[in-house]
Amino acid sequence: MEYYIQQWAQLLSKTLGEALSPEEIMTKIEIPKFTQHGDLAFPCFVLAKLLKQSPQSIAEQLAVSLNHKAFKKFEAKGPYINAFINRKEATKETINRILYEQEKYGSHTFGKGKTITFDLSSPNIAKPFSMGHLRSTVIGSAISHIAEKCGYQVIRINYIGDWGTQFGKLIAAYKRWGDEAAVKRDPIGELFKLYTRFHEEATLDPQLDQEGRFWFKELELGNPEAHALWEWFREESLAAFNRIYTLLNVTFDSMNGESFYNDKMEAVVTELQNKGLLEASEGAMVVRLEDQDLPPALIKKQDGATLYATRDLASALYRKQHYHFDLSLYVVGHEQTLHFNQVKSVLSKMGYSWADDMEHIPFGMILKDGKKMSTRKGKVVLLEQVLKEIIERADHSIKEKNPELEARRIIAEQVGVGAVIYHDLKHYRRNDVEFSLEEMLKFEGNTGPYLQYTHARGCSILRKAKVKPSVIEDGLEDDPSWELVKLLAWFPHTIEVAFEERDPSTVAKSLFKIAQAFNHYYAHTRILGGAESKAKLGLTRATILVIKEGLRLLGIQAPVEM
RNA sequence: GCGCCCUUAGCUCAACUGGAUAGAGUGUCUGACUACGGAUCAGAAGGUUGAGGGUUCGAAUCCUUCAGGGCGCGCCA
């Protein structure tokens, strides 16, 4: 599709006697909203000033003088020139390219030789895996796939929250009210109960907070009892997280959590000291950032224990040394924007210019009744519960619609999980989303299962056709197939935009449109048999290849039957 | 109080980053050949883009004021 824009821009530039460069024209060319306005449009307003004529008359004059073999015709419509692409040629080219490249279609090379580290998921041990963690996991994972498709080498880091005052609190809570057998039976549930109880009682009894701080300090000092408890909690939690990651089909290259940086923090603190950045303030150690219009970053607490900023500094340094990243992306909720800016600023002050290569990718929160879900008060929706429920529904649905399907359980998982992932990724990542189980459990309309269903149906046709077209000789011309082909042709560009914007929803939206166009096509055209059967089958196969690859980028499976 | 973000159909969201008649999904109502899989398709209804002002050929989009909401703002992460 970009090819046509280029061609037309060159042609326009030439006929205008180079009053505008092809590049300038290219940025102006747009895709018309209405099909009767053709495939590409050029608004003539910019020319009005240059040529001192009305845009309407410019459009009229230009339209008649244009001529290019890739285009069927050019039409003036008010101040616009509309271009109509030669469909037969374009459908053939596009379909054949997809059939030839298959799952490679849409790849780019601009990331070749460069490395990106991803900070994603990063759940807190001691807290259950919530819907909020789902966002970081799923968005981060999708962007990392998209980056790979653009040629980058990616390193997925799950920076587990396995260190910090919350462990002191958890240890204190366990020592007060804990029951070993109960924790063994249901680790996450029980630990979470202890955690919320701690926060409830701490509001009445400030003594508790002190106890929590005390135990964290002990943990940092290497107290064996504290350490053993911490280790136990950590293992149990990780096992539970891994169940979820398996379901979500997410993998990591590093599970180095915050605790990994314990022995690397003192070095950071001394470095800050040596560089004269550290200051005592109200008993704590801080780096002042007034010149950046930011509040000071806290490096050490009054009692000498470290804070998350300290650990984030240590981990950033480690990642740079270890992975030599060209870009370091942090997929973290937007409520941490300030913290992230502080960390970056401190690194800059330390003289590390690569701090500019660190990028926060914020996303909106999942709200409940318009409010943030608070872990501390126990008001969270647990991802595992939601997944369980939705897989059950998918299973039920398959039983009803496709009773003889084998491996129902596996497909049900793919469909259910696909619904959850897609529901998250279809929204622009920065918007807050209101949590609605009802909405998430839907399998109709703009949903993951809709895309999967479209894919399965396409596969079904190919099975019946008993041939797998790998090249077609003739193109197609009808409206429904043309609309579909245009969308398929834009797919590579979509990938590029999705990467640049670090926005998986771009891919999700494009897939939905493709599926919609295919279903429309399918409903109005007999694919098997008849004239142009081979081209139509080719288009079908091209479509399912793109849907499958697009879903893969989003982390969603594409079953051939469902 | 200060800073950042948000407000589009009943609901959930789009709109190629300033372009033609603001579009989908869902919900409501109505239809689809004994169908290449009905988790689909077609149609109807639904809007002063939170309010006012400004910038220009042109504004949901940029600037400004106001209203409503969210998040953050030194010992949580």
Image (spheres, coloured by chain):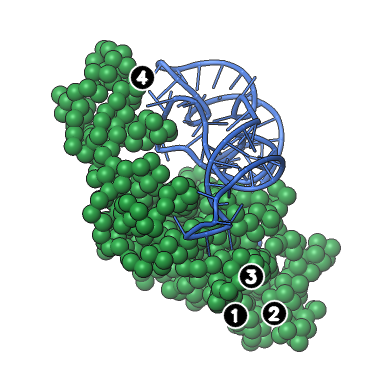
Q: Which chain is green?
A: A
- Structural distance between the alpha carbons of marks 3 and 4: 56 Å
Say which residue appears at 42% left-offset and 58% top-offset.
A547
The residue mark sitting in front, 3 or 2, is 3
Decide which of tag 3 and tag 4 comes sooner along the chain: 4
Secondary element at image label 2: helix
Secondary element at image label 1: helix
Secondary element at image label 3: helix
Location of residue A382 in the rendering, given as x and y in whole percent from the top left corner: 68, 66
Same subunit, labels 4 and 2: the answer reads yes
Q: Mark 4 points at which residue?
A: A78
Location of residue A174 in the rendering, given as x and y in whole percent from the top left corner: 75, 79
Q: Name the residue under label 2.
A: A187
Camera sees residue A550: no
Q: Chain B is drawn in which colour?
A: blue
Task: Name the quarter where the N terminus of chain A is drawn.
Answer: top left
Q: Residues within 10 Å of mark 1 (few under 14, many from 20)?
A: few
Secondary element at image label 4: loop
- Structural distance between the alpha carbons of marks 1 and 3: 31 Å
Say which residue appears at 54% left-offset and 63% top-offset.
A418
Q: Which amino acid does label 2 sit on?
A: Pro
User: Which dot marks residue A399?
Assistant: 3
Task: Name the quarter where the C terminus of chain A is drawn.
Answer: bottom right
Left or right? Give the position of A428 relative to A8: right
Same subunit, labels 3 and 4: the answer reads yes
Decide which of tag 4 and tag 2 comes sooner along the chain: 4
Q: Mark 4 lies on which chain?
A: A
Q: Mark 2 lies on which chain?
A: A
The residue mark sitting in front, 4 or 2, is 4
Which residue is more in the foreground, A370 or A320? A370
- Structural distance between the alpha carbons of marks 1 and 2: 10 Å
